[in-house]
Amino acid sequence: MTSFTHILDQLNWEEITLSIKEKQAEDVERALYSKNRSLEDFKSMIAPAALPYIEEMARLSNSITQKRFGKTIQMYIPMYLSNECQNICTYCGFSMDNVIPRITLSKAQIIAEAKAIKKMGYDHILVLTGEANKTVGFNYLYDALQTIKPYFANISLEVQPLKTEEYEKLLSIGLHSVLVYQETYRKSTYKVHHPKGRKSNFDWRLQTPERLGKAGAYKIGIGALLGLEDWRTDSFMTALHLDYLQRHFWQSKYAISFPRLRPCEGNDHDEQLMRDKELVQLICAYRLFNEDVELSLSTRESPAFRDRLVQLGITSMSAASKTNPGGYALNDDSLEQFEIDDTRSAEAIATMIKKQGYEPVWKDWDSAYQLIK
């Protein structure tokens, strides 16, 4: 099997960028009304030429999403266990070169956080850490998942890339999903923003979803940090990656997130700004390209904007998020990974979703179905 790394190495970033920008109205219309949309159609739908067609894209996206997922929004919440990190990343508050209070939660503190989150009604949790192998390596994660498991029906993980056999062990004790974002698929730009630490290894990170597929992960999340590079080209690379993974590891489900750069400690740059209208375009394009992929939206976005996106293809949303370890129960002074924008409570988000005729789902029943199999 040819690795996606090899496929990406054969591509010319500038040529793909140009091919997207050169798409015309007739290309967009052909893509919108195609029965089997291709990667070339995806290019058309994210092109500047598609901006006048956003209302039609939104209508189609809404119809497809309701047909495939119903009128439901999966509720999840991030739980940060540590902000210790051995990487330097130019856009992240946890970056090793930031002089900030550091904390790694103990077992007792993890339990306190889990209980605080449980009181909000959550059964779906996303566990996160910085990338510090000696402090929050595999053994720490294994113990932490065992500690958390009694409290939640569905546990997802967003941490440093691991080995295939390590993922297999975590999956064996109840891990459901793993999210690993490439940040940007352009290697030269990636190196600029990740100058030091294990994360500086572009290929090791890029191959993580393949290791997850080999380990038998139930769901794999991928994506780019929108703003590090041209968002259109990075999004096409993400779609290409998704297509590759679904063909080679078809047993797994897939999810895509849409993180835009947010203010954080040590970050004062706006690299490649993406407008709200363009994010709507991108979300709809992914839904039209792939009816089965789950699309997730975090509290990075503003309340008014998140409200509008409920009906446009999103299938999961976080609420009441804290991006610092101990943020729910400990009230410590550890630094956030980034600033959130939507600070509403989980209850307020659920009420908003219901007012739009959708149902907030607090428990992911897929785990139960998996056990029945």
Image (spheres, helix red, strand yellow):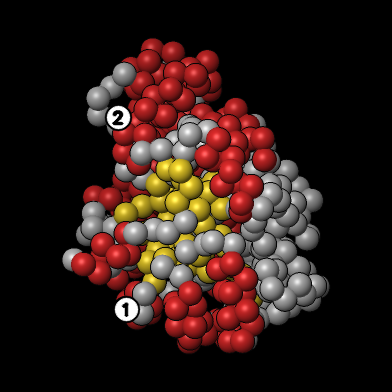
In x, y percent, where is residue 169? 34, 81
Q: Secondary structure at mark 2?
A: loop
Q: Which structural element holds mark 1?
A: helix
For label 2, count other residues whose C-alpha is less than 10 Å away and answer few (under 14), some (14-19) or many (20+). Answer: some
Residue 247 percent across, percent down from the top left: 24, 50
Kind of residue sitting beneath label 2? Arg
At label 1, which amino acid type do we have?
Ser
To which residue does mark 1 refer? 172
Ranked by sequence position, the earlier of labels 2 and 1 is: 2
Q: Is residue 323 above or below residue 243?
A: below
Which class describes the residues within 10 Å of circle 1: few (<14), some (14-19), or many (20+)?
few
Say which residue appears at 34% left-offset and 59% top-offset.
365
Q: Quadrant for residue 36, please give it.
A: top left
Q: Is residue 44 above or below residue 13?
A: above
Q: Name the spot of residue 282 as percent of width and height, x first.
A: 50, 34
Q: Which residue is mark 2?
A: 37
Q: Quadrant of residue 243?
A: top left
| Image quarter hosting the N terminus | bottom left
Above-or-below relation of 195 to 141: above
Q: Nearer the viewer, residue 170 or 93?
A: 170
Would residue 88 be seen by someone viewing this image from the given angle? yes
**Residue at 61 percent of width and 53 percent of height:** 346
226 with respect to 166 (left or right): right
